[in-house]
Each structure stands twice: as C-alpha cells, then as structure tokens.
Image (tube, helix red, strand yellow):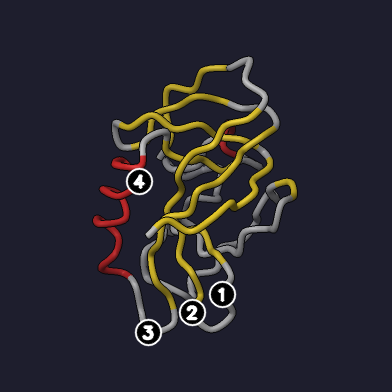
Amino acid sequence: MCYNFENTNMTEFIGYKVVFKNLKTKEYHSALTGNKYPTNRKMPIWKIQRSTLTSYFIEDLLYKNSGHWNIEMQGRTAAFCCLSDAMEFKDDINFYSTSVSKAIIVQVKLIQDLLKAKFNGSFVFAGRKMKILKEIN
C-alpha cells in the first residue's frame, strides 16, 4: 500500500503502472482491486471490488475500517517512477495471471492533485486522472 504521502507542485507525471490486461476485451484492470480502469478520465471512487480476472487483490482495500484503506488514495491511482520498480512488482504478481488475464506494465500519464508517496519501498506518484500511453514489453 502507498504511504508517506507528500504534496507536489507538479501538474503531470509520466510513469509505469502494473495492471492486469483482460486478454479477451483488451481492457486494463487494477491489480489491487480488479476494477476496470477508465480511459483518460477521472478515477472513480470505487465502492466494490471486482476480482474475477485474477486472485491477486487486497480483499478489504476499499473498506474504511480495514488496515489497507487510505484516504489519500481515494479517487487516485499510482504509478512507479522507475521502470525497474514496476518490473519487480510485475514479477512478484505475475504468478496470478490466468488464461483470461495477464500482468503487464503500461506507461501512463497522471494529472490532477499529484502526490508523491512510497509503495513497497519504491517511489510512486498518485493522481486523480490517468491516461494509458502504451504497453511496455
């Protein structure tokens, strides 16, 4: 989970995000919640989790009374600063890929209310709007 949040004066950030790609629909889904990412618009405040693509997700991530819920991440998504950090995280969760989903890395642009944070010891930025730029092989 993200921690050690800091405000920034940045207006945009281009980084790397690990997602699960639905191999049938080609849609991108959150590795942590299973929810489908919107295309170039504000991140929704998800109330429920969709875990049908993979068994890797944090079961109580969206519930305020859990130890995983974080007010700073509500309505935001995060991306790694370094491709190598994204690759390491992808390697950690690639085991959870299925016949209908695959863990991949995408390059993304984040904007709106950017925060700097840490995730598993790596630097990330979190923003309210995400545009997927391309898949990274």
Task: Tell me residue 77's x, y (percent).
Answer: 56, 43
Q: Can you say which quadrant of the picture contains the N terminus?
A: top left
Q: Would you call the spot at circle 4 few (<14 residues within 10 Å), some (14-19), or many (20 or more)?
A: many
Task: Tell me residue 114's x, y (percent).
Answer: 61, 27
The numbered disc on residue 26 is: 1
Q: Which residue is at 55% across, 46% downward?
A: 108
Quarter location, residue 71: top right
Q: Secondary structure at mark 4?
A: helix
Mark 2 or 3, closer to the camera: 2
Q: Which residue does the numbered mark 4 point to in the structure image?
A: 86
Query: How far apart are labels 3 and 1 at the CA level?
Result: 13 Å
Label 1 sits on what residue type?
Answer: Lys
Q: Secondary structure at mark 3?
A: loop
Label 4 sits on what residue type?
Answer: Ala
Q: Which residue does the numbered mark 3 point to in the structure image?
A: 99
Quarter location, residue 103: bottom left
Q: Which residue does the numbered mark 2 point to in the structure image?
A: 23
Q: Are marks 2 and 3 in contact (CB under 8 Å)?
A: yes
Residue closer to the observer: 105 or 66: 105
Q: Which residue is at 42% across, 56% downward?
A: 136
